Image (cartoon, grey):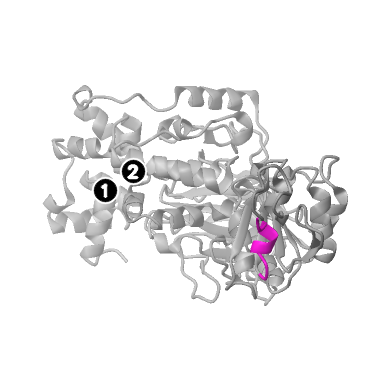
Amino acid sequence: MIDTEHTLTSPLSTLSQDANPLLGLTIVWHPDASRIGEQFIAGSGAGVLEVSRYLPLFRRPGAEGLALGHGGISRDPLKLVRDAENGLQIVPSASRMVVELNGEELLAPHSLSAEQIEGGQILGLGRSIILCLHWMRCLPKNNPVAGLLGVGSHAIVARDQIRQVAGTDLPVLLLGETGTGKEIAARAVHALSLRAKSALVTVNMAALNESLAAADLFGAVKGAYTGAQTGRKGLFAEAEGATLFLDEIGNTPASVQPMLLRVLEGGDYRPLGAQHDQHSSARLIAATDQDLDSDHFNQALLRRLESFVIHLPPLRARREDIGVLMQHLLKSNPQMAELSLTLPHSLITDFARYEWPGNIRQLAHVLKRVMLALQMGEVPLFETLVKISPERITSSFLSSASLSARTVLGASAVPAASNNTANTTSTATSTASTATTSAAPARKKLTELSEAEVLTAMEENDWYIQAAAQQLGVSRPSMYKLLETHSQIRRVEQIALEEIRAALANSGGDVERCAALLKTPSEALRRHLRGLGLLG
């Protein structure tokens, strides 16, 4: 059910600075990969939103809406209650569906502040679907720019700004942390400009030799300096009629900064040793991850560069885009795309929760390492893939491979304090710390595991193979071997149709309960039921 009084239906495009933000629900992960990035945008006022298997409808801009639709999601809705101060209370449903907030199981109503939602909150449903709760300050919009992916407000605004300035000759200053995509944004500005058919000339200002920087940029005549046996054309001349991208502008040698200022002011420059000025028609784009508003950088030059500034936000500020970015990176490699089907739900949750100090570049590197591990039949721990520190986690960071060790959020436990979770108590902190240090069980030999342990792991993880394998400390291929030889666990193909029908009826259509009755893995049962036409 949706409270229609508080559901956005008007053709609003952007919000004023002081307006209440819209509540966005973005699909970060879904068993159907094509659903990743779909959104439901609620209104900007107080109200109640119910989330179930059938409502609300998630969509891409201009497309038809679809419910979450997965059998692991309860028909009985989870409620999101927004108050007048933009706080949000999450009220779990009365069903058996597992609800997780930032990787921690939620058993009782839990409140979030407006500031916490600002940083994105990761909501796991039924250990199958992951949503991000976040604020939207504009409506979803189909404004594609090559290489700049994302469905949240930050991504939409950045693409709009790029499109807005691309058709002009204004200098552009790109600001953002390392790994946020500044070079991609520069290439996009050039590609959408009237100069697109000309080259984009790129120079890393930090790599320039201070004694030769002026010659590199502006050129030099023969004999202008020791060793200049011939004249040389500088980068400004090379970029004539095109675009010159000055990367790492904050590291420009001090002696060159006044020369750049002169070019920006009138387009004129003088090659080293030359008698006359030359005029440049190059369009300038500059980028940096530094604070240029300081004594080490020429402030007059900064004012010129600030003709049009685009801020590229860090990944931790656009958590709703992580699933879209992961899916894009996986699709770029067919082998990785195939392996993505085996990514554990808990590991994806950890990806969505992490602060990513290296931003998109770090995300890409870590994802590649995960894929290499999966190729070897291993399920890596997230802690081993990144350098974990207290300021880089959205809550007390728990092992991605130990579901049973996760702190339960209920009346007696709240998540650890950070910019993304609620206030903590010493008890909760201690519990989380213990979970972190204990991590996942060490790798075990198959001969060390009894049939009773394997059966218990499957029962405690709703008959999902990957989660049970993580709990036991074995790889997914090893888990399949344990299941094949188990005397009580059956392959779904070995079970009579009449028994399956009866179990499905007795479980009320709940696949996980049906799997428990039949003692067969949930994933295979779900596929089999669909093949038989018994599951929509």
Q: Position of residue 189 (x, y in %)?
A: 64, 66
Residue at x 78%, y 48% (from the top left corner): 256
**Quarter holding the C terminus?**
bottom left
Mark 1 vs mark 2: which is more N-terminal? 2
Look at the image and give the residue range highlighted in magenta.
Answer: 232-241
Q: Amino acid at mark 2?
A: Asp
Find residue 399 and name its label: none
Kind of element beneath mark 1: helix
The location of residue 302, given as percent across then percent down, is 82, 52
Residue 443, percent from left and from top: 31, 26
Where is residue 108, by image quadrant? Answer: top right
- Mark 1, residue position: 515
Q: Is residue 413 magenta?
A: no
Amino acid residing under circle 1: Ala
Alpha carbon of mark 1 to alpha carbon of mark 2: how far?
Answer: 8 Å
Which one is nearer the viewer's eye here, 274 or 418?
274
Looking at the image, residue 377 sits to the left or right of residue 267; the answer is: left
Asked whether the beta carbons under mark 1 and mark 2 sit within 8 Å of each other, the answer is yes
Instruction: Please tell me which residue lies in front, 206 or 15.
Output: 206
Q: Main secondary structure of the magenta part?
A: loop
Q: Residue at x 65, y 55 (%)?
A: 232
* Residue drawn where x is 67% and y is 48% of the image: 228
State the residue position of label 2: 462
Residue count near mark 1 (Cα–Cα under 10 Å), binned few <14, some 14–19, many ≥20: many
Estimate the x, y position of residue 261 in percent, counting from the top left. 83, 55
- Looking at the picture, does residue 344 appear above or below residue 35? above
